[in-house]
Image: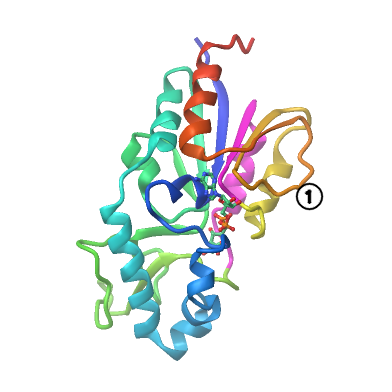
Amino acid sequence: MIKRKLVAFTGSGISAESGLKTFRDSDGLWEEYNVYDVATPEAWHRDRKLVLDFYNARRRQVINAKPNDAHIALAKLESKFDVDIITQNIDDLHERAGSTKVLHLHGEIMKSQSMLHRQLVYAIKGSELNEGDLCERGAQLRPFVVWFGEEVPMIRPAEHVISQAEIVLIIGTSLQVYPAAGLVQFARPGVKKYYIDPNPDANIYLGNTEVLNSKAGIAVPRLVERLMTDNYE
Ligand code: OAD
């Protein structure tokens, strides 16, 4: 049986019920930190330790977090659909829930990257990445994440993946950050979309979209149940 292609595009809201903060909600990370101090190339040049400390704290939280019912439900979908996850999240909760195809648009917190040889990417052992941690060619390692002002190398592969989708799920994202937010426009016209968010962006026009105004941990398992039983032929 050929499985239908389903693409889930996720943002920080899907990990909120795992205890990881979103960015732009009232208690979000960008309320607590100035993005320009911790998540830009300029910040890295100005105060490397501050940047490393910020991501070390994020990494410790990710290690202690567990996938929630929404991550787990998406992994279950693979028994009926050919599922691709495109996530803006740098955590590894989709993988730990069992999803097998996960494309990270904004990088991965559990990995480091050489400052000089960008192809050199390593799994981080433990939670800390520090000044003096070097790649095999002697250059400082940085968090393997996309900072503001940097290119998003995975955007083209992501556009290709979403253009193949027959069903699209958009979960827990404010759709404020480009180019990621523009991805949904690469879905084929008329493709059925579901947008799950307790505070969905009211101005967004996606077309053929069912908005489920609810938390991911509740709405995603319910929707997955529906999709597993519905006849989508
Ligand atoms: P935002 O903080 O902009 O948006 C989070 C969204 O999650 C909001 O629409 C909330 O309503 C929603 N939300 C909150 N709790 C939820 C829950 N329990 N279930 C479902 N949804 C919930 O975060 P993102 O859209 O992920 O980029 O932000 C995009 C990018 O901006 C991030 O990848 C990051 C950030 O700056 C970089 O660091 C490059």
Q: Position of residue 179 (x, y in %)?
A: 66, 57
**In the image as oriented, which residue stretches furthest toward the bottom?**
46
Asked if one can make out residue 74 in the rendered structure from this viewpoint, the answer is: yes
Per the image, is 161 magenta?
yes
Nearest the eye: 172 or 138:
172
- Left or right, 157 with respect to 110, comes to right
Q: Quadrant of residue 112?
A: bottom left
**Dot 1 beta carbon under 8 Å from ligand 1:** no
- Left or right, 98 with respect to 153, comes to left
Per the image, is 111 magenta?
no
Q: Quadrant of residue 110?
A: bottom left
Q: State ligand 1's quadrant.
A: bottom right
Instruction: Please tell me which residue is depicted at 53% across the width and 78% down the height of the picture.
Output: 34
The C terminus: image quadrant: top right
Q: Amino acid at mark 1?
A: Asn
- Left or right, 64 with respect to 5, comes to left
Instruction: Please tell me which residue is depicted at 45% across the width and 64% down the height of the picture.
Output: 145
Magenta span of residues: 151-173
Check the image and report above or below for 201 versus 106: above
Instruction: Please tell me which residue is depicted at 45% across the width and 87% down the height of the picture.
Output: 45
Check the image and report above or below for 2 versus 105: above
Q: Residues within 10 Å of mark 1 (few under 14, many from 20)?
A: few
State the residue position of label 1: 203
Q: Position of residue 3 (x, y in %)?
A: 52, 17
Check the image and report above or below for 154 versus 133: above
Q: Quadrant of residue 164?
A: top right
- Left or right, 80 with respect to 189, comes to left
Q: Position of residue 93 (x, y in %)?
A: 36, 45
Nearest the eye: 151 or 139:
151
Assign a secondary structure to mark 1.
loop
